Image (cartoon, rainbow, N blue to C red):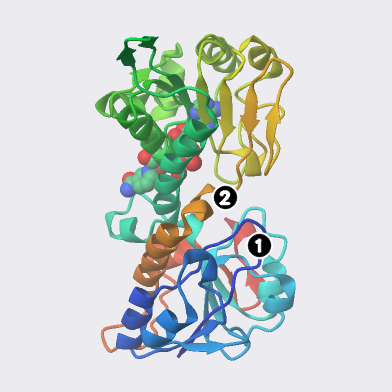
Amino acid sequence: MQIGVPKETALYENRIAITPDTIKKFIKLGHSIVVERDAGKGSFITNDALEQAGAQIVDDAISTSDVVLTVNSLPIEQINQLKQEAIVIGMMNPYRNANLQDYANRHAKVYAMELLPRTLSRAQNMDVLSSQANLAGYKAVILAANQFGRPFPMFMTSAGTVKPARIVILGVGVAGLQAIATARRLGAVVEASDLRPTVRDQVESVGGKWLDVPMSDEEKAKAKDTGGYAWTPSEQYIKDQAAVVDKAVSQADIVITTAQIPGRNAPRLIHQATIDKMKSGSILLDMAVETGGNVEGSVVGQNIITPNGVTIMGVPNIPSTLAAQSSALYANNLYNFFATLMDDNKAFALNPEDEIQKALLVTSQGQVLLASR
Ligand code: NAD
């Protein structure tokens, strides 16, 4: 089988879906690899390095490939070049992808890595959301620190005492937890909150303080049974949460928001009235800016300074700012999934009943499968 890797075309995208390490592994499985010229450039992987690992550098990695590995869903021009029945594996943005029917029209089998059943232990080494969010949580703190006009740790100097920075993290999934740990390592005082009360122990284990929102017994029961994802909060919870958030955020130096709901717009957690109370020089970094934003007024790709001196950072695609590393982890995740499509004789063995393959497959045999879930 020929595996093709195009150069990513999306704005803000520096990653690549293959690395010299995974090229060698694919070749060991008996496949040939073509990579579009300069596809590794944004991740500091040269054409020479890809070639030395065994790939062929080409101008068109799509139209002759049986399998296409990608970071983002392909643009329509490339979808229309896919071989009939090609396999496409990547972060296909399945709930917002307007091109799924176009893939189906090519009879492509599209596997959307975001749909991985994350609680399955054999799926953990394929979990692109975790590998990318972990790096993004770290980098969000570094970006905010760079923008902030003060240091994070406490300093006792002869010229005066420097207070530690107060940081609030809203949403404690993979990114939020890494953000807490990173901010703590840099010496900040960190508070955090999430809809899911079960993450309290994780927050405390990395040195954060849990911001508690009161919950009824009914809400506690709802929160338990969501497979690790957010539950739909009651109006009372939203009101109570807003009061807790307002108090913590208005006293914070830096706030990083990471709250996401798979398949839906991100919840709005910080409103203008709270931003108006924040100190001049404080920072709001909205990691959910690309899915609607947790922060009122955040804009993709912009740092907005409000009249009261708060910087609202809408940094898009944070994993891509660490492309050398995020590509390496992402490429490993893709390889690990790809390997499950092969049998012991290194032949393709697509299994529609396999729990992971079934969950990821969004188009097959001319049909879009997602809507029927
Ligand atoms: P995510 O990016 O979907 O969301 C980030 C966080 O935002 C979540 O913790 C969510 O509860 C929170 N959130 C959503 N709406 C909110 C609101 N209105 N107010 C406050 N917080 C809100 O999350 P993720 O990083 O993809 O992680 C999702 C879950 O999957 C987590 O429980 C994570 O631990 C779990 N996970 C499990 C495994 C595993 O079991 N192997 C692997 C990876 C992730």
Q: Position of residue 158 (x, y in %)?
A: 32, 10
Where residue 125 is drawn, which disc sits there? Answer: none
Figure quadrant of residue 18: bottom left
Observer-nearest residue: 252 or 290? 252
Residue at horizontal 48%, vertical 65%?
43
Residue of label 2? 317
Q: Amino acid at mark 2?
A: Asn
Residue at horizontal 51%, vertical 33%?
144
Q: Is residue 72 above or below residue 321?
A: below
Residue at horizontal 58%, vertical 84%?
61
Give the structural element (helix, strand or loop) at label 1. loop
Figure quadrant of residue 367: bottom right
Q: Is residue 330 above or below residue 341?
A: above
Q: Is residue 53 above or below residue 195?
A: below
Which quadrant of the figure contains the C terminus? Answer: bottom right
Ligand 1 image position (quadrant): top left
Measured Cα–Cα span from mark 1 to mark 2: 10 Å
Figure quadrant of residue 339: bottom left
Q: Is residue 258 visible?
A: no
Give the structural element (helix, strand or loop) at label 2. loop
Which residue sits furthest front?
Answer: 158
Q: Is the Cβ of the residue at disc 1 closer than 8 Å to that at disc 2? A: yes
Q: How many neighbours does mark 1 have within 10 angstroms: few (below 14), some (14-19), or many (20 or more)?
A: few
Where residue 10 is drawn, which disc sits there? Answer: 1
Q: Is residue 333 visible?
A: yes
Q: For this view, does 100 lie left or right of residue 22?
A: right
